Image (cartoon, grey):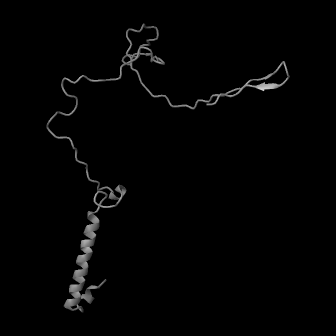
Amino acid sequence: MELKPDQLEQLNIEQLIGIIIELRELVVQLKDQLAKNSENSGKPPSSDGLKKQRTKSLREKGKRASGGQTGHKGHQLETTATPDAIITHAVACCPQCATRLEGVAVSAIEKRQVVDVPVPRVEVVEHQAQIKQCLGCGQAVKAAFQPE
């Protein structure tokens, strides 16, 4: 019910009480809508918008320091003695004084290995069945393909 300010003066008490009751119900309904999110209703998580609640960590605080613990032996990917490819990065000149270094012998090498999973590729196998002419009867004889 929409009323202009000058119309309010013409209403009696019962009508004003009715309007107040309607407005209270509307406020309760709107508060319920605001309180709903994906955790307490059937709404999808995408409808939560930017007001997503932060998840609380299940880790108990204070028992251990964060990071590696003292005495724990670390694990890492070991380097291989036979890499698939070796790429040499040569230094051509000194970054300090710009002296050319092409004829200078290498004094040391620093190595780094990059381990990568190759891209899977499709393997195509062609099967060829031989056909031969029989010397006895002249019949063309074809080899059978093996069942896969």
**Residue 99: x, y in percent?**
41, 13
Identity of the residue drawn at 40% across and 17% down: 80
Q: Is residue 106 above or below residue 61?
A: above
- Quadrant of image for the N terminus: bottom left
Horizontally, is 69 left or right of 89 in the view? left
- Quadrant of image for the C terminus: top right
Task: Answer with the quarter of the image where residue 63 lies.
Answer: top left
Identity of the residue drawn at 59% across and 29% down: 123
Pick whichever, 92 or 110, lies toward us. 110
Identity of the residue drawn at 34% across and 60% down: 43
Identity of the residue drawn at 22% across and 29% down: 68
Pick whichever, 105 or 75, lies toward us. 75
Q: Is residue 50 above or below residue 148?
A: below
Horizontally, is 48 left or right of 83 in the view? left
**Residue 19: x, y in percent?**
24, 83
**Residue 113: x, y in percent?**
40, 21
Task: Answer with the quarter of the image where residue 48 lies.
Answer: bottom left
Q: Residue furthest front?
A: 136
Number of marks present in the image shown: 0
Pick whichever, 132 or 33, lies toward us. 132
Task: Answer with the quarter of the image where residue 77 lies.
Answer: top left
